[in-house]
Amino acid sequence: MRPRALRHLSSLVAAVALGGCGKQVVAAPIPGSLVVVQGNNQQAQGGSELPNPVIIRVLGTDGSPIAKLPIGFSVVQGGGAVNPGSAPSDENGEVKVKWTVGPNEAAQLLRASVPGVEAVNVSATSLLPTDIVVAQGNNQSARAGAALPNPIVIRIIGPGNVAMKGIAVAFQVVAGGGLISPQSGITNALGEVTARWTLGSVAGTNTLAVSSGALQPVAISALGQ
């Protein structure tokens, strides 16, 4: 028997007579493998949904897509979330899910599985804040007791200088006795928080500390004249 006929026999068919009435039963297709169609090796800011959905296809032992077969999904590394957690395959043998990466670990891993078939993993990278950058406002001067001419602009970035949105930033005057407003903020779409700094009433150096989570704090200086 030719190989093509053998594959056809093992995965799909077996026609059998029922009760001598001449009816035939077609065996259900046998799952053989899972394939990652789309969505591997993406990246997004921690806690955000990946830009493209993950698509998994289930194939029979003959290489043909299998419809109406549930595929399960589970996050096995990174603490993110997948939606839906399970769904039946469509006419192309595919299930599409949305994956939100976790907020605390860079390496993320999603697993797709079907009983009796080797599971497949999908990887992603969660971009986490790495640095506090003074985008504007360092080393200014103004009359003692007055506001600096330009606002302080702080930017939070991740790997590759990617702007980090929605990150908490705190300001604290540590020398000079001035005021900062606001004392804290959340980064915008550019990864930035803006604040106004009023210097202390005594001439001399003023220092502002900027912090964000576990990142290395930075200091900003100004001179009161």
Image: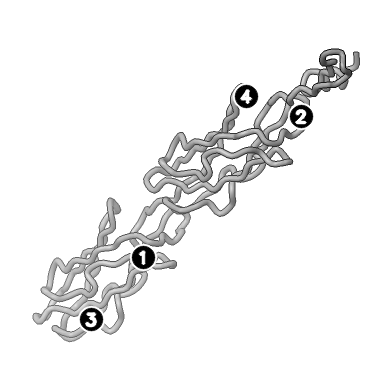
SS type, badge 1 = loop
Amino acid at the residue labelled 3:
Ser
Closer mark to the observer between disc 3 and disc 2: 2
Task: Kindly indicate whether the residue at mark 4 contacts the one at mark 2 (C-beta within 8 angstroms).
Answer: no
**Mark 2 = which residue?**
63
Nearer the camera: disc 3 or disc 4 = 4
Query: Distance from label 1 to label 2 (Cα)?
Result: 49 Å
Residue contact at pointers 1 and 4, CB within 8 angstroms: no
Q: Which residue is drawn at 52% across and 43% down?
A: 124
Q: In which quarter of the image is the C terminus?
A: bottom left
Q: Is residue 199 left or right of residue 26?
A: left
* Disc 4: which residue: 117
Q: Circle 1 sits on which residue?
A: 187
Query: What type is the residue that disc 1 sits on?
Result: Thr
> Which of the marked residues, 3 or 1, is nearer the chain's N terminus?
3
Task: Indicate the secondary structure of the residue bearing disc 3.
Answer: strand
- Quarter of the N terminus within the rendering: top right
Total of numbered circles in the picture? Answer: 4
The span from disc 3 to disc 1 (Cα, nearest Å) is: 26 Å
Write down the residue under mark 3.
Answer: 141
